[in-house]
Image: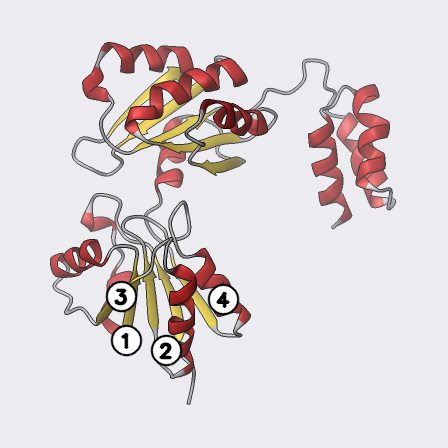
Amino acid sequence: MEPGRLWVVSTPIGDLGDLSPRARQVLADVHLIAAEDTRVTRKLLGSLDVVPPRVVSCHDHNEGHRSAAIIECLQGGQDVALVSDAGTPLVSDPGFRVVRAVIEAGLSVIPIPGPSAPIAALTASGLPTDRFLFAGFPPRQGGKRRTFLESCKEEPGTVLIFEAPHRIVATMRAAEEVLGDRRCCLAISLTKQWERFHRGRLSEVVNVLVSDPDEVIGEMTLCVEGAAASPNEDPRAWQVVDALARAGVSPTVIRDAVAAPLGLKRRMVYQRALKGEE
């Protein structure tokens, strides 16, 4: 008997038309759906005229226990779909422990691509898309939130952050203080009827939110431009880093030896050297 497969299915973040035909077919065909909230998933299935199979909860508080049951189903030849309330499972949603456990059990995991708020926000932001960091939700406490933002300070790619409406102004003010008044795009209620975007400097978008409290409603995805290159950075300096990495010099040694003399950021030199080792 062939084992079943775990299908990781992306579901709409607003507009039901964004669910792919393939995703609908998988949800209709599997033996079991593991859902972040069974009520939300049953409502989705009803709107799709899909007669639901067995639907069980799989969330942050029971994911470890549920993993064993899902593996048992897969080993018994049954296919299972993993879904979150909206968007792509595992991306600031439950599912990671299930996927890891299934892989460790030697079973198949198949992604069904689809809606994802970070990608949707990034593509409409007007900020660079060639490199980005999805950082998820920042901590709620001010000190920890500042530490979180400090860790993003030297990231050269666009930084993507989720935030709750009642904390978005505080987070954006903290981002301005830690990162500087960078360009940003705040995407609100993506794919919904009241979808909107605010683009500008962090301070400018904060002023819009403060002046109009009605704007601080909905799901928030914040895109912030990455760190600017050092003003004295010479593109040829990276050739030196690459050459040393290819020669087998340790990334740590390269970082310590060339970052300061070449006017490069230590963290970026180390990351570039690591890639050069591969």
**Residue 267 vertical position relative to residue 16 in the rendered view, above or below:** above
Q: Earlier in the sequence, mark 4 or mark 3?
A: 3
- CA gap between label 4 and label 3 equals 17 Å
**Residue 13 vertical position relative to residue 186 in the rendered view, above or below:** below
Image quarter of residue 244: top right
- CA gap between label 1 and label 2 equals 9 Å
Q: Earlier in the sequence, mark 3 or mark 2?
A: 3
Q: What residue appears at the point 58 percent right and 22 percent down from the top-left corner?
A: 227
Q: Earlier in the sequence, mark 4 or mark 2?
A: 2
Image quarter of residue 162: top left
Mark 1: give few (<14), some (14-19) or many (20+) Cα within 10 Å. some
- Which element is circle 1 on? loop
Mark 3: give few (<14), some (14-19) or many (20+) Cα within 10 Å. some
In the rendered structure, find residue 73 and report the number of the disc placed on it.
2
Q: Amino acid at mark 4?
A: Ala
- CA gap between label 3 and label 1 equals 11 Å
Mark 2: give few (<14), some (14-19) or many (20+) Cα within 10 Å. some
Q: What residue appears at the point 53 percent right and 17 percent down from the top-left corner?
A: 178
Query: Which residue in the protein does label 1 denote?
Result: 31
Q: What residue appears at the point 25 percent right and 61 percent down from the top-left corner?
A: 21
Q: Looking at the picture, tell me which residue is in the foreground, 152 or 140.
A: 140
Q: Amino acid at mark 2?
A: Cys
User: Could you tell whether 138 is left or right of 44 in the image?
Assistant: right
Image quarter of residue 31: bottom left
Query: Which residue in the protein does label 3 denote?
Result: 56
User: In this rendering, does residue 156 appear at all?
Assistant: no
Marks 1/2 in contact by CB < 8 Å: the verdict is: yes
Q: Earlier in the sequence, mark 3 or mark 1?
A: 1
User: In this rendering, does residue 82 appear at all?
Assistant: yes
